[in-house]
Structures are given as structure tokens and as C-alpha cells.
Amino acid sequence: MATATANTITQTTYVSPTRQRVMGMVFLGFAVAIWVLFGRETEPGVITTFGMAVGAQAGSIEPLRLPSLATLNILALASAFVGAGQLARGFGRYTNWMLALVTGFFIFSFLTWAAADKSLNLVGLLNTSLSRAVPITLGAMSGILCERAGVVNIAIEGMMLFGAMSGTLVASVTDNLWLGVLAAVITGALLAVVHAVFSIKYMVDQIVSGTVINIFSVGMTSYISSKFLQHYQELNRPGTFRAFPIPVLADIPVVGPILFNNNMFVYAMFAFLILLHVALFYTRWGLRLRSVGEHPRAADTLGINVFRTRYMAVILGGMMAGFGGAFFSLGSVGRFDEVMTAGRGFIGLAAMIFGNWTPFGAFGAGLLFGFADSLQARLAILGIPIPSQFLLMVPYVATMIVLAGVVGRGEMPAADGQPYVKE
Amino acid sequence: MAPVLELKNITKQFPGVLANDNISLTLEEGEIHALLGENGAGKTTLMNILYGLYQPTRGEIFVRGKKVEIHSPSDAIAAGIGMVHQHFMLIPVFTVTENVMLGAEETRGGGILDRAAAAQKIREISEKYGLAVQPEAYVKNLPVGVQQRVEIIKLLYRQADILIFDEPTAVLTPQEADELVKIMRSLVQQGKSIIFITHKLREVLEVANRITVIRRGRVVGATTPAEADQKKLAEMMVGRQVDLLLEKKTPKVGDPVLKVKDLVVLDHRDHILVDGISFQVHAGEVLGIAGVQGNGQTELVEAITGLNHPVKGTITLLGHNITHATPRQITKLGVGHVPEDRQRDGLVLSFPIHDNIVLNTYFKPPYSKGVVMQAERILAEAEELVKAFDIRTPSAKNSAGSLSGGNQQKVIVAREFSRPTKLLVASQPTRGLDVGSIEYIHARILQKRDEGCAVLLVSPELDEILQLSDRIAVMYRGKIIAIVDAAKTTKEELGLLMAGIAPKTEGKEVSHG
Amino acid sequence: MAESKQPDTQAPAEKEPKKEQGFMRVFLQELTSQSLLIPILAIFTGLVLGAIIIILTSEEVYAGFGKSFGAGLSASWNAVRTAYNALFTSAIGSPSRMIAALQGDDALEIRRTFNPILESLVASTPYIFAGLAVALGFRSGLFNIGVEGQLFIGAIFSAYVGYRFAGLPAFIHLPFALLAGMLGGALWGFIPGWLKAKTGGHEVINTIMMNYIAFRLSEWLLMGPMKRPDSFNPVSPTIADSAKLPSFFEPPIRFHAGFFLALFVAWLVYWFLFKTKWGFELRTVGANRHAARYAGMNITVVTVAAMSLSGALAGLAGANEVLGVNYNLALAFSAGYGFDAIALALLGKSHPLGVVLAALLFGTLRSGALGMQLTAGIPIDIISVLQAFILAFIAAPAIIRTIYRLRKPGTKEEDSLVLSGWGEG
């Protein structure tokens, strides 16, 4: 079998040299950007103060005081160093981690520059970022569930919106937040059934089907809202899930207030993240689900029920979106407003793409987008001359860049969006 | 002892077509049973029935003497039947292990995958049958031959002992094919039984223990390699029809029209598929390109017609360098192209026939004046061509998709043959057509030649090549290994050349002028 | 697989010509009648479901059923009748009043009675443009979900030209403002088109993203650079009179030349798509890009051009609203025209004439719903629900066929909206 082995060896894994070079240039670009945009704008001797505590800890933990210019120079150098390393040798499969690192440097530089000679509560900012990331990540996970099984779901927005409303309604009527969450999840599932029947049974174009659900959800929730919720205030008073500090953990300095003093949705998101990640990549269930999204015919020939798998995935995705929708009303403001999701479902879709159809990737993207979102709210306070709308554009522009393959194209499921026709 | 597998009177009726007509077949333990037939004879349908992808209209299946009902692939797998599909059923982004265990996963408690255990099993199977497959490799990184071995492992992993190979060599290089033959022998030695579906005579004679030939959905004969030779098998396969003898005038060969020099073409994965080819086609002759499918013919044609650009070499058409020309420029220079895949490339099925008739000339007068298309003129022209080329349709306004395969091809032929061309590139012009349409298209090609047009004919069908060509170039692994005079060569010689066995005497190339 | 399918397609067609011509004609008639029947039934079913929603959300109905079953039924009937009656009269007007007004001499009364129907036409106009934009995309195999964003950018451009270049004569200023709107939309369509052609980035995702970029951009412009100096709201300055689309009647009638422009553009799109070689290329690329490549068409150019043209049409929808109706740009000027346009392009089978008819329907519904909200207390959002139902039934005619027990038509060409999945470059 000598020839056979030889065959295998000649086909070594192909790492595109251009991607290596492009990423190197991107890293260097970040370094230059840090230096030009922030470093040269910062006076020497200025101090940036980052608040590292909120609430009860505020007195006990000292804020972090950094010399602004020195910090910026170090970060620029570090980025340049990573970029040079990438150009010279390449980091292979760790390239994406390096990208995350350098992006982190860039963001930190931005903050250092923005808060130069001022004070910025870093912990508060990160905590808000995390909670803004919740609906985005849940939406993205909804998309992952569907698309990994080969069904495109652009109806995340609609499912979330409807979930937000039915959650509010049920929680207000029953005076029980958990029942509200349950109602939101069921609503998401029902809309998902519609999407599944349309796209799997009737083989309607999945984007059209998603559009149907989006239009319907916006129309129906606004209709119910203006017909009932605005007239009967008691129907729109569900209350909210309160933050629940986890004993001991919540007291850890810095990390505690960011991670362990949140409401149920944040913890649930982490639980779902881990669950979905394990389920997708380490279980029989996930292997079969992914096989259906990659090559349904192959799965079929191995006795896997393509239709059933897809139905299940889409409905689970709908439940996830419904749950994420409940966050808007029950997890945050405590009432339902018309079109309150405001495109977060689509940002979820973007986070899914940005995160390469993986739960943790999507979470990373969700954090980034959530960060941009929470930062824009503070721009005015810090007196930074960047219109907040431009920060809000970040998710969209970033997604388009990823989609264009500039920094390496993601691997979407091969059969995504294609109806399966049994012979 | 009962045979391992027995098919009794299997009949499969599709709407309007009898795909399998009363087929009976037995497979003994430890044998390779070849199922031989032309494309469209009904081999794949039969095997899809056996694998549970289709349900037979009538007939019974017995495994080791016991009657089985196969309604889905799961039933087939349970009965010990496995199939290596013509188009691999592999998921490129999965590893070998994941592909193999999919649907029959090794798990620890709670449905958690046990990749290590599965990989160990794969390694054992791989060693036992000499398959040399690494379980951790990603399928997308494996060459085709290895991917096929992964398919085989999938079956062995499920303990299938009846293995169906559906045209397994169609996608392989000759070396890989030889490798496969060895693997098949090793499989039967270890007690497996194999049904080997093919239309390649040489392989059948080389590897099979018994041979069943089917034609038009019916079993027309059974034999063994000892009793049969290629000629006899070929006769059984195509029927005892006398070779369609075409009235063929002696060629009036003119100046070279197309010159191809040192051409190198890559595919999208940067594999070399055309490897330094040079040849010329002269006015008034048919140059046939023979060869097993997948030896670079498709890419050669794409390069000549501007659909793909070569990385090296030159293509000259009547003195114009068209190496990097666009399809539009090449069409304008007077090249007609009958594409290999008529439904994918040659036609817009949802468009009416008249729009397809002007698909690549719509922009020129008289079909367009300025930017405005001349609908009446186009329709009139199309109706005329429908008559002239005997396209069976109520009207040229009907959609191309409503036509039968033969008539669809005639639409393309009408379009490409009716305008004045200097060079005609015909790629598998009669694939999958009925005899009547084949005859018609062959006559049209020769007519074109006699009008002084240079014709480049690409076909894996030796008969077609022999009947139409004046010279024959044989392609093998991206190279032309010989150009022979059609009048002086034989099927046997071409067969050897197609198998990569170079001619004994050097300098066998013939050329005009 | 292919092996067995081949004969499948061959056999039936061979026989057909032998049959009588009469059979063919009957067959064709049936086909066309069903292709009209399905949209009509879809609209009808949508209205029925809308009625059910109105009943289910009406307090009077519940009160009625609380008294007796009969009272409940009559309350249901009343609710639906009031609602749809209000819808009809505010969309079309009251025929008897029109006749009376025409017989009388009161000019204001005439204007008032004819206002509803003209107002419906006003509401239809942006739908026509936006629907044409989506339809043109569909014809070239592209799914332009970005019409809403393109419409915003178009509105921004034409609003800017409208107030910034005051003083130009109308015959220059108006065309200039319209062209600016087209240019803005075209630009917003060009980007995803170019990305699709050059990088294979899927236009659906890119246009969704471009929508939100457009929203944020207009938000910023209206709160900053383009904000009317004397206003606290995010509104642009009023455009100059010379940039306004001429209106023909005195207030309250808002009916303006935009409607005729829309009809003309619809005709132009029809002519372009079906009579010119560019349209032929666009449709060929949409129907079979492999064949288009074989035929020597430049797929890159066609794709980019199609998206840009689609964007330009969408931009006209925005320009129309700014120059013909609002005379300024406000944040909430679009009632989701771009998204509804997807529904109406499908309803109109991506044919300009179909689009115009579907747009008239949607415009009428919308303008009627406004009246319905005022007189019957039914929130206007019911229209979106109706549109979603109609779109659903158009997209899945099998549902309609099941409900009304229609036979499945014999050809495969029907309901052939199969667009590429995410993955296809």
C-alpha cells in the first residue's frame, strides 16, 4: 500500500499564504491606527483612570490609573510585534486568537485615549456590554441551531419581538415572570414551526419565509400593543428579573461584578452557550444535526431522518429566539414597546456569521457588538467627537467585511438554505 | 447454500419509463459480480432499489435465503448491504472518523461521541483491508481515491458484507483505479461479496468472477471473463445493432483553423488538469478527442471556448491569439460550441425556445437594433430553425424545459450550426440521447465538416469518435498521448491508448500539412 | 440519479404534439386562470384571516359571547363589517357621496369625496417604485432585501438637493432632485452588488446590513448635519418649491405627479426587461448563470448593474416621498415600504404590470387602514399582518390549493421562486 500512503502525504493541509500576509497587514494596521489615531492625540503625562468597581465594592477597590501615552505606545508596539510575527512566521491555527487579541488591544487603546485625563468605569462598561450581548448571543445561537441544520433563519428578529410581547402579556396577567418566559419560548417555537413547515415541507424560499414571519411579527405585536397594551397598563407591567449575585463569586474584585451579579438571562446565556457548544461538537445529536446541514443526502443514506432533524433544529432555534426576546421586556425594561427589538435579531444574525457559526464565536461577536452598543451610550459623557451612530454601525460593517472574505471567509454549512428533496 | 443476495424479477416503473424490467440476479459469497451496461441501461436504478432509495414496482429481494423488505437505507444497512455511491456521500468538513461513524456513532453515556474508540475501529479496518486511511484527517483534504476508501470503510464499519460499487472508477485516475481493484480483491478474500457496476469492459474482464449484462432495463446475458472478451461484451452491451454506418466523404482538408500550443489549465483547486497539450485542427476535418472522462477534456474545451483561462501556452484561432479572450469574443470570431452539459450551460430551460436560439447572438443585428431586441425577427428565425432541425414542439414559444432531451440538444445544435462558423467545438454532443437524435446530430456534424468547418469533437464514446473523426487524439491524465489516423486505427488500439498504454512505435502522430 | 431522471423528462413531451391543439389550448387556459386564481384567493384568504384577528381582538365580541351565542355572532359580524367598511370607504370613498358632490357645485366637497381614492394612489406610488426594485432584483436572480435602506439613502440625497439647491428653476431642480435620489439608491445597491460579484458575499446578508447602516446614517444626518436649524425634532429643512413634484389639486388632496412617474417607470422597466438586450442579459443571468457565462455575458457587470438599478428604483421611492408627499425628510417617513415590497413583488410575479396592480392593492389597503384606525379603532398594523398572510400564501400556493381543493397544475414552472442559498457564490 505504499502508493496509497504516498497519495495521502502529497495532499498536506493547505494554508493560504495570502491570508497569512493579509492578517499580518491587518495587525500592523491596528498598530499604526493605535499610534496615529490615539497616541498622537494624547498629551504626555496625562493619566487615564479606569473605575474597577461598582456598587458596594466601590469604596474598597482602587481605580486603575494608567499613564495614557505610555499605555498607548506599549499597546501599539505589542500589536506591531504580533503583526510582525504573523508576517514572518504566521500563527497558523491560532491566527484568529491573535486577531481577537489585537482587536482587544485596539479597543483598550481607544478607551485609554477616550478617558485620557478623565475617568471611565471599566467594570460598569463591561457589565453593560455583557448584558447587551445577551439578546445578540441568544439570537445568534438561534441562528446557529437552524443554519447548522441547513435552514436559513432571518426571522430571528420577528421571533424575538413576538417573544418579548407574549412574555410581557403572560407575565403581566399571571403575575409570574417564569410563566412569561415560558410563553415567550412557546411563541418562538410556534413561529419556528411556521418557518419549518414553509421551508421544509413546502420548500418556500427560506428568506421569503423568514420575511413573512418578520412582517407578521412586527404587524401583530404592534397591533396588539396599540389595541391593548397601551390602553390597559396592567397588561404591560410584567416586572423584571432582578440581578442575582452569586454568593462568594460576586465578591471577587473586578470579575465578580461583571460576571456574577446579573439577572437570570445572563447566566442562562452562559449555560446555553456551553450546552450548545458541547451538544453540537461532542454529541451524536450534534454530529447528526451538522451532517444534515452539510450534506443532507449523505445523512439520508446513513439512515438519518433529514426532515425530522431539521424540524427539531428550527423549533429549538425558535425557542432560543423566543427566550432571547423575553430578555428585552422581562430581562431589561419591564414592559413591551412597539418594535423594541430594534434590529437586534439581525445583529444576532450578523454575530452568527461573524462567529463562524459557532456558539463561542457568536458570543465573542455578541460581546464586541454589545460593547460598541454600550460604549456609544457613554460617548457623549466622555465628550468624544464620534457620533454614537457610527459605533452602532460597527456590527454591520464588521459583518460585511467578514463576509467579503477580507480576513478569511467563514465556513458556512454547505447545504444552508437549500431545501432537501427526497428522491 | 443459498446465495448471499438474490434479486427476483425486479421491475421498476417510472412515469413513462420502464427502468428495470424483470431483472433477476444472484450474488454468491466471496465473488465479484459485475453488472455491465451502458449509461441509462438501468443499473443505478436497480442498485438504488437494493439500497432502499427507490421502491420496486414488483419483485423480491432475498438475503442469505431470507426475504427482506428494504424501504430505506437503514433497512439496507441492517441487512448487511452497503453502497459506494458514484457521487461520494461524504461531508468534506468532517473528519474521516466523523464521516464513518455518522449514523452509527460510538458513544459514551449520554450520547457523547467517543471519537477515539471509533478511530481505533477505523484504524483496525484500514489495516485489515490495506486501506491506508488516517481517521483524523479531514475529508476535504483527501484526494479522490482516498475519499473512496473512506466510503468503503463506512460500509465495513457497519459490518456490511454485500458491497455495491456504483461506477467506482469513473472519478479515479488509472493508478487509483488499479489500487481499487486490489482493494476489491482483498475484500472478497476476506469473505465480502461485491456487486460492481460499470460500463468499462476492461475492468470487468480484469476483476469480475461473473458478469451480467443489462440493456434497456433488461438482463440480456450472463457470462464470465473466461468465456467473454471485450468484443463480445460490447456487442451484448449495445445490442446486436450494426454499427451506424455514415456516409462519409473523404475530407477536403484545408488550412489549420485552431492551433493549440503547450496548453496548461488548472482547476479551481489549482490541480493541473491539462498538462502541456499541443495540436491543430484544420478546416474540413473532424479531430476527435478520445479518452476516459475526467482526463482533462472538459478543461481543454473550457479553455478553447474562453470559459476558463490557461496558465500557460497559447491558443490561436485563424491567426488571432484567443488565449485570454472572452467567450463573447470567441463566438464573434466564428466558433460554435455544443457544451458538455446542455441543461446547465447550453440552455435556459425556463426561457422559450426562441430566446434560446439567440442565446449567444441576441446582441447582433438582425436580432437587436441598438439595444432593442427584434422579437418578431427572432421568433420567425426560431420557427424556421425548429422546422429545419426537426425540433418537435408545437411552437417556438414553448419553453426549452418542456422539450425532451433529444430536442433540447437539437435546439443547441440549431443555434450553433445554423450560423456561419469556422470552428465547431462539440463536447459529448449525443450524451444520453436516443438513437434517432444521435444519428441526426452525427449527420449534421459531418455536414458541417464537409462545408469546410473545422470540428473538434470530444467524446468518451469510442464508436462516436471512430465514426466521425478523421484524426483522433487520445487524452490521458491531461496529456495527449497519441494522435492517430482514424481510418487506420482500431478500437483495440484506442482502448489501449485510453488506458494510458503508449503506442509501441514512437512518432505515431499524424498530421496534415 | 441523473440516469434515471433523464427519461422521465423525455417521455411526456414527445407525446404532446400528437394530441389535438384544442387540448393544448384548454390546458394553457387552465394554467393561466390558476396563476391568476392563486393571487386572488391569497388576497381573499388574507382578508378572511384578518377578519378573524379583528374578531378575536374585539372586546365587543367577547362581551357579546358573554351574553349569548347569538349576540356574540352578531357582535363578530359587526366588528368585521365596521372595520372593512371603514377600510373600504377610507380607501375608495363613498360612491353615493361622490355622485352627490358631482351633481352639486361645491368644489371643496368634490375634492373631499374624491380624496380617499386619490390618497390611495398616493400611498401606492412608493409601493410601485419599491416593488419594481425588488422585482428587478428577482429577475436577475438577486434577493434585494435592502430596498428599505436604498430608499432611505435616496430620500436623503433628494432631500439634500431639494433644500440645498433652492433657486434653481423647477425644470432643472426637480429632475436633479429625482436623479439624486436614484443615484443615492443606486449607490446603496451598487455596494452589495459589487461585493456579490467580486467576493461572493451573499446579497441578502449584505443588504440587511446595509439597511441598518442606512438607518443609522440617516439618524446621524438628521440629528446633525441635515437637521433643520429651528427644530428640535430630527427633521431636515423643507425642500424648495422648485423641487416639489407638481400636484394637481388644492389641499387636502395630495395627489401628485409621482404616481404618473411611477407608471411611466413601470413601463420603462417592462420595456427594459423584456424588449432590450440588456434586459435579456439580466434575465438570463437570473435564470441560469452558467448558461449566461456560456453565452458570453458578463456576469459581474450584469450583477452589479442589476443591483444598482434595483437600488435606483428604490431610491426613487424615497425621492417620491420626499418630493411629492412630505417635502422634507423625517426619520420615520417610510412605513416599511422596502419590506412590504418583497411581498408585492412576489404577488405581482416580478412582472412590472403585476407589481403595479399589487402596489395599488397594498396602497389602497394602507390608506384605507388609516381611516379604519380612526373610525373603527383597528390599529393600522393590521395591514402588515394582512400583507404577511398574502405573502405566505403566494409563497406557498400549495396551502391555497389545499384549502380550496384546487388541482396542482401540470407544469413545474409555476411557483418557481428558487433563489440561491447562502452558500452559492
Image (cartoon, helix red, strand yellow):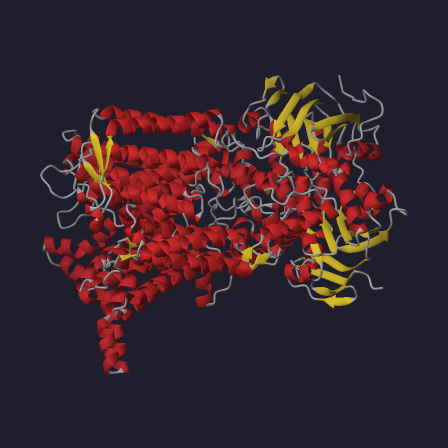
Q: Position of residue A277 (x, y in %)?
A: 46, 51
User: Can residue A217 be seen in this snapshot?
Assistant: yes
Residue A179, compared with residue B120, is above or below; it is below
Residue C249 in the image, given as x and y percentages of width and height: 15, 47
Q: Residue at x 24, y 39 (%)?
A: A389
Residue situated in front as seen by the camera: A186 or A178: A178
Horizontal arrangement in the rendering, residue C198 relative to residue C336 (left or right): right
Q: Residue at x 72, y 49 (%)?
A: B165
Residue plotted at (39% across, 43% down):
C205
In the figure, residue C305 lies in which quadrant?
A: top left
Query: Which residue is pictured at 49% across the width and 57% down the height?
Result: A310
Instruction: List the single residue furthest toward the bottom.
Output: C68
Residue C41 appearing in the image = no
Number of marks: 0
- The extreme right residue here reads B227
Towards the viewer: C41 or B19: B19
Residue C48 screen position, x and y as percent: 34, 66
Horizontal placement of B512 versus C376: left or right? right
- Is B217 positioned to the left or the right of A326 in the image? right
Note whether B304 is above or below B71 in the view shown: above
Q: Nearer the viewer, residue B45 or B103?
A: B103
| Residue A364, picture quadrant | top left
Q: Which quadrant holds residue B258?
A: top right
Q: Residue furthest front?
A: A60
